[in-house]
Image (tube, grey):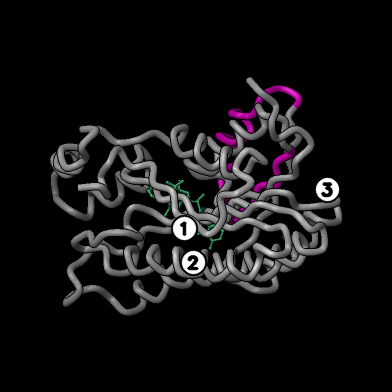
Amino acid sequence: MTRVLEDKVVVITGAAGAIGTATAKLMAERGATIFGVDIAGADWSRLKAALPEGAKLVTTEADVTDEASVKAYVDKAKAELGRIDVFFNNAGIEGPVQPIESYPLDGFLKVLSVNVAGVFLGLKYVLPVMYAQGSGSVINTSSVAGLIGSPGMAGYNTSKHAVIGITRVAAVEAASKGVRVNSVNPGPIESRMMQSINSGQATDAKAAHDATSGAVPAKRYGTPEEVAGLVAFLASDEAGYCNGGFYTVDGALSAT
Ligand SMILES: NC(=O)c1ccc[n+]([C@@H]2O[C@H](COP(=O)([O-])OP(=O)(O)OC[C@H]3O[C@@H](n4cnc5c(N)ncnc54)[C@H](O)[C@@H]3O)[C@@H](O)[C@H]2O)c1
C-alpha cells in the first residue's frame, strides 16, 4: 500500500459512520493522522477496530450544525495536530422518506441544517486554516441524490444538490490560495443509511433494496470502501488539478 498520505492531518466529520470509518481506515493505511468528529454519544468502536495498528487517531464529539462546536473542533485539531491537510466534510442524515405533500417541514429543515449548514460551517472554519498554510484538500460528501431526483427524498436530494453548489463556490474562492474543494457523489452504498431509506420506501425493505439494485447499471450497491478509494485519491497530491468538481461513485446510476 502506497503511503501517499504520510504525515497528512485529516479531519473527518461523520467519522463513526460507514463511509467515514472506511475512509479513515484507508487514509490511515496510507499514512494519515485521523481527527474524527461525530455527534455526542457516537459509537467509536467500529472506527477504532478498523484502523491499522499504530495509526494516530484523535476523536472529538461535536454537532456540525452548531457554530461554536464547529469552531471548537477546528481549533482543537489545529492545537493538537498543528495543521489540517485534508477535510472530509462528510456528516449527513437521510431524513424522512415521504412524498412532498406529506413531507414534514421540521424534517426538511433538519436535513438542510445537517447536510447543508453543517457543510457550510465546516468550510467556514477549516478554509482559513488551509489558506494560512497555502495548501489543503476538502472533499464534501454529496450523493447521486445531488444529481437526480429520488421519490420521497425531498429534503435529502435538495440538500445534496446544495452541497454541489457550495462546493463550486468554495472552489472558486479557494483555488488561488492553493486549496482544492471537490465533492464525492456516491450511489446507494451497503450501509445503515440505505437500510433506513429502503425501509421508508416500502414495507418490504428487501424488495426496495432489490429494486434499487436493479436500477443501477452495475446491478449492485457500492461499498463504503469503494467511496473511500475515491475520497483518498481526491485528498492526495495526485489530484492536484482536480478542483471544483463532483465525482460519482455510483455504478453508472447517474449516467442512465
Ligand atoms: N450510505 C449511502 O448509501 C450514501 C450514499 C450517498 C451519500 N451518502 C452520504 O455519505 C455521508 C456518510 O453517510 P454514511 O452512509 O456513512 O451514514 P452513517 O449514518 O453511517 O454516517 C453518518 C455519520 O454522521 C454523523 N452525524 C449525523 N448528524 C451529525 C451532526 N449533526 N453532527 C455530527 N455528526 C453527525 C452520524 O452520527 C453518523 O456517524 C452522508 O453525508 C450521506 O448523506 C451516503
**Magenta segment, which residues?**
33-54
Judge whether residue 215 can be spotted in this image: yes
Label 2 neighbour load within 10 Å: few <14, some 14-19, many 20+:
many
Residue 225: image x %, image y %? Answer: 47, 32
**Which residue, given by chain and number where applicable, does mark 2 sit on?**
114
Q: Which residue is mark 3?
A: 81
For mark 1, give the secondary structure: loop
Query: 35 or 235: which is nearer to us?
Result: 235
Type of the residue with mark 1:
Gly
* Residue beneath disc 1: 92
Q: Earlier in the sequence, mark 2 or mark 1?
A: 1
Q: For numbered disc 2, what is the local secondary structure?
A: helix
In the displayed structure image, the side of residue 102 where residue 163 appears, left or right = right
Q: Is mark 2 within 8 Å of ligand 1?
A: yes
**Quadrant that contains the N terminus:** top right
Residue at mark 1: C-beta within 8 A of ligand 1: yes
Does any atom of ligand 1 lie closer than 8 Å to the CB of label 3?
no
Residue 47 among magenta residues: yes
- Amino acid on which the number 2 mark rests in the picture: Val
| Contact flag, marks 2 and 1 (Cβ < 8 Å) | yes
Q: Position of residue 188 (x, y in %)?
A: 31, 44
Badge 1 or badge 3: first in the primary sequence: 3
Residue at x 30%, y 37% (from the top left corner): 251
Residue type beneath disc 3: Leu
Q: First in sequence, mark 2 or 3: give its number.
A: 3
